[in-house]
Image: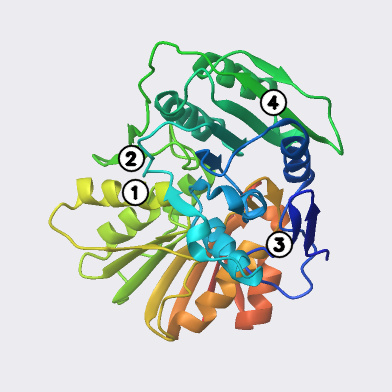
């Protein structure tokens, strides 16, 4: 797969995370190229210009614009790590970019804001509300994305919170949205939002970029019916924890166990931490923002429960799930178990059988299957 990003700002070596053999996907898309081409032709920024980049997948925008020392804000730990590795690969200093996460916004206004449109509209809305305090009428604001990931709702949100919008022509199935920044009435972000978990007294916290923010999703509801109960597991991981509801119920069934909540989303970890703390204010748990289980010691965990994501940003694929399964095999103690739920058509049992030899189907319905494997 092509690894050299060739744009007017230069040629840069770019790779994705997590690494995988025979990678088929580039670390950038046509929207990155379109935006960088437009900036080189139409936008004049000086070295002292304050530049903010939102949702840069693997650092293509930030690295191409490194001379401007941009502030790069993302909810993805993997995105930040990939950007840092790509800085090294191109011989650029780490301080060429200032990293911020989705819960740690800058305070001073910017001369230019470049937005890669995220998959989740609620997350985009939350970001646009925060941006109101960081722009002036002279701020250059441009959003970029692939046409299929930019419904009309994207333009309406930008118009509502930032100012009138104007779309570009589409090129290579990518589009830019230009915003005429205007000073408007300040909006308060509605996030995080909360709901009460059905048939319990538990209050579930959901930041804007967390899956199924307003109610329990049907896959998790199905999984909760079959969660392992009262095992002798001492160390338990909710892998890809989201808002932490699975780990919360595992904690109820294993009151003496140590719980670990793991996700690569800053908002997911913040949601899980508040969810667990509200339910068990005097009980400790570990919260790990990371590439899955990479930081865990070999053979250190007894039970892992995983509802893997089948997309990375706007890209569908099983690479994240397969990485989680391999990590789980390494981290599980002998006799430890991994529970996985997935959409029936994803066929996770094939990968699980290759790794663990035996894969047991625990339950299934028309849409989902729950599997268990033992080490």
Mark 2 residue element: strand
Is there a contact, CB below 8 Å, between mark 4 and mark 2? no
Residue mark closest to the camera, 3 vs 2: 2
Q: What element carries label 3?
A: loop
Q: Distance between the residues labelled 1 and 4?
A: 31 Å
Name the secondary structure under disc 4.
strand
Q: Which callout, 4 or 2, points at the residue further toward the start of the chain?
A: 4
Q: Can residue 187 be seen in this view?
A: yes
| Element marked by disc 1 | helix
Disc 4: which residue:
177
310 sits to left or right of 234: right
In the figure, residue 189 lies in which quadrant?
A: top left
Q: How far apart are marks 4 and 2 (CA)?
A: 32 Å
Residue at point 73% right, 52% down? Answer: 28
Q: Which of marks 3 and 2 is nearer the N terminus?
A: 2
Question: Does the image show residue 369?
Answer: no
Residue 358: x and y in percent read 62, 80
Looking at the rendered structure, which numbered label has been put on residue 205? 2
Name the residue carrying label 3.
Answer: 347
Instruction: Locate residue 197, reporting x and y percent.
Output: 33, 39
Q: Mark 1 Cα within 10 Å, few/some/many (few <14, many 20+)?
A: many
- Residue shown at 59%/27% (left/top)? 140
Above or below, 109 against 7 in this view is above
Q: Name the residue under label 1.
A: 270
Who's the residue at 68% across and 80% down the image? Answer: 354
Mark in front: 2 vs 1: 1
Question: Pointer 2: residues within 10 angstroms few (<14), some, or many (20+)?
Answer: many
Q: Tag 4 or tag 1, which sits nearer the N-term?
A: 4
Please indicate whether residue 46 sits to the left or right of residue 71 in the image: right
Q: Which colour scheme is used?
A: rainbow
């Amino acid at each position: 797969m092509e690894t050299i990003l060739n744009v007017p700002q230069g040629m840069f070596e770019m790779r994705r995370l997590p690494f995988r053999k025979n990678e088929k996907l580039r670390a950038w898309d046509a929207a990155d190229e379109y935006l960088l081409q437009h900036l080189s032709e139409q936008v004049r920024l000086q070295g002292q210009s304050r530049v903010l980049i939102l949702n840069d997948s693997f650092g293509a925008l930030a690295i191409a614009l490194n001379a401007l020392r941009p502030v790069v804000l993302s909810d993805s730990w993997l995105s930040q790590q990939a950007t840092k590795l790509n800085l090294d690969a191109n011989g650029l200093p780490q301080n060429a970019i200032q990293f911020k996460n989705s819960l740690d916004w800058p305070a001073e206004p910017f001369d230019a804001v470049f937005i890669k449109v995220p998959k989740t509209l609620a997350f985009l809305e939350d970001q646009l509300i925060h941006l109101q305090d960081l722009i002036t009428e002279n701020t250059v604001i441009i959003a970029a994305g692939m046409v299929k990931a930019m419904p009309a709702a994207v333009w309406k949100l930008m118009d509502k919170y930032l100012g009138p919008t104007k779309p570009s022509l589409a090129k290579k199935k990518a589009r830019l949205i230009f915003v005429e920044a205007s000073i408007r009435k300040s909006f308060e972000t509605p996030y995080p939002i909360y709901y009460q978990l059905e048939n319990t007294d538990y209050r579930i916290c959901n930041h804007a970029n967390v899956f199924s923010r307003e109610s329990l999703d049907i896959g998790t509801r199905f999984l909760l019916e079959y969660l392992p109960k009262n095992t002798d597991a001492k160390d338990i991981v909710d892998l890809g924890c989201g808002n932490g509801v699975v780990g919360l119920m595992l904690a109820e069934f294993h009151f003496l166990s140590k719980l670990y909540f793991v996700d690569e989303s800053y908002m997911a970890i913040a949601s899980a931490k508040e969810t667990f703390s509200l339910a068990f204010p005097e009980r400790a748990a570990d919260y790990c923002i990371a590439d899955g289980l990479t930081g865990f010691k070999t053979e250190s965990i007894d039970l892992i429960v995983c509802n893997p994501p089948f997309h990375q940003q706007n890209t569908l694929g099983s690479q994240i799930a397969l990485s989680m399964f391999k990590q789980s095999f390494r981290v599980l103690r002998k006799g430890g178990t991994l529970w996985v739920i997935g959409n029936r058509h994803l066929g996770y049992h094939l990968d699980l059988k290759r790794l663990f030899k035996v894969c047991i189907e625990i339950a299934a319905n028309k849409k989902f299957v729950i599997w268990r494997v033992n080490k």
